[in-house]
Image (cartoon, helix red, strand yellow):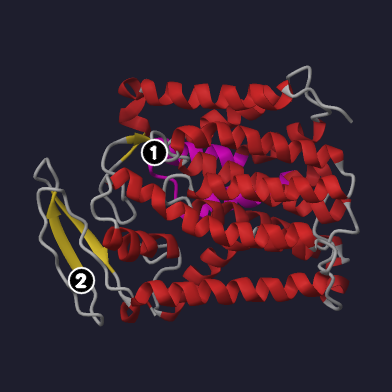
Amino acid sequence: MITDISSYYIPFIATAIISLLLVLTKGFHGKHTCDPTVGIQKFHACHTPRIGGIAIFCGLIIACFLPTTPDTKLLKLMLIASLPAFAAGVIEDLTKKVGVKTRLIATMFSGAIAWWLTGYTINHIDIQGIDSLLSYLPISIAVTVFAVAGISNAANIIDGFNGLSSGTMIISFSAIALIAWQVGDTNLMHICLLLTTVTAGFFIINFPLGKIFLGDSGAYLLGFMLAWVAVMLPMRNPTVSPWASLLICSYPFIETTYSMGRRLIHKSCTSQADIAHLHSLIKINAINRHFPDVPKHLRNSMVSPFCWLLVIITASISVAYYQQTTLLIVASIGIFALYTISYKIITRLAPSLEQTPSEQKIYQPTPKETISLEYRSPRKEIIEESLITEDSIN
């Protein structure tokens, strides 16, 4: 099937323009749409629109109705199914009052609708015994719904720095597109390419300057889309191992499960926000320490490439060995081990105090303490940033 190239560059341009318009008009809507600069996971210095998901959703709608775009029936069904998750994200972006459980239920609802509309479920994972259970439709549906909700929420968890979540999505969609192309599933390949180009339209406004954020709406929308194409890839193509999809989605999945385990061990709420994620610690313990003179918004962007390395590794293995279940399982275990080792290393680094250029005092904390450091911004406001070392989080 030959596709007009305009099917891809028009949605890309449209998404970029809409994202830019949202930035330029923040004076009108910023009261409701801008992300506050004070909070446990707030690393940015100025009020920034957090409604990038609206631009991405509009870009996908435009892609669906372009006359040059190939059969988009499946993409349209996916967009319909995404509405509960997307709506919950939009409301949270505007009101900051939608609870974690409510958003989790919304993503589960989207997963159930996707099954109802498309008929796909996770009916095997190439492990004897578990596959027998998945042969029962109610169990298969339940596993699918929970998996979709898990990846959707995981995409939101890794949305902490400029380009991190959207860059991860671009790499992941591209990997699934490559596998779909190898097995001749051109429809799924085109869907993934559209998702890639639309996300890229937002990405160029978000990275590296951070002029607009993905927000919960964008994270849940893209997370759901990634989860569903990951479900469909092996279910539509029996030669593809389900573990190829899991490995492609492994970075956000590992970040989420590792964080939940860490919080359970320390008897803290599993849904409570903190700055002990790998990407947060890279910023606090490595980037701030070694690049103190780089502007703050660019330091935020410097975190993402480190995390993209994990995604590139998993995506490359999946694309190259998408048929080899055993190797993919070993790779999944290996990437979890690599994440754990990386986490241990980064927590051993002494955190560095983030400062304004006019304040060059350097504080050297002891390696066995959790410290809370205060500094003054150019507006002389007191901002508190918790810096965490290994003993306090492990």
Task: Relative to 8, say whether 299 is above or below.
Answer: below
Q: Magenta-highlighted stretch: main secondary structure?
A: helix
- The residue under the point 90% across, 59% down is 239
To which residue does mark 2 refer? 371
Give the magenta range. Answer: 84-113
To which residue does mark 1 refer? 210
Type of residue at label 2? Answer: Ile
Residues at circles 2 and 1 in contact by the CB criterion of under 8 Å: no
Please say whether residue 102 is one of the residues in the magenta stretch: yes
Numbered disc 2: secondary structure: strand
Decide if residue 298 is on the left or right side of residue 231.
Answer: left
- The residue under the point 82% across, 26% down is 3
Residue count near mark 1 (Cα–Cα under 10 Å), binned few <14, some 14–19, many ≥20 = many
Instruction: Tell me residue 192's x, y (percent).
Output: 72, 41
Q: Nearer the viewer, mark 2 or mark 1?
A: 1
Numbered disc 1: secondary structure: loop
Residue count near mark 2 (Cα–Cα under 10 Å), binned few <14, some 14–19, many ≥20 = some
Asked where in the image residue 199 lies, by quadrant, the reply is top right
Instruction: Tell me residue 363's x, y (percent).
Output: 14, 68
- The residue under the point 27% across, 38% down is 46
Instruction: Tell me residue 386's x, y (percent).
Output: 25, 64
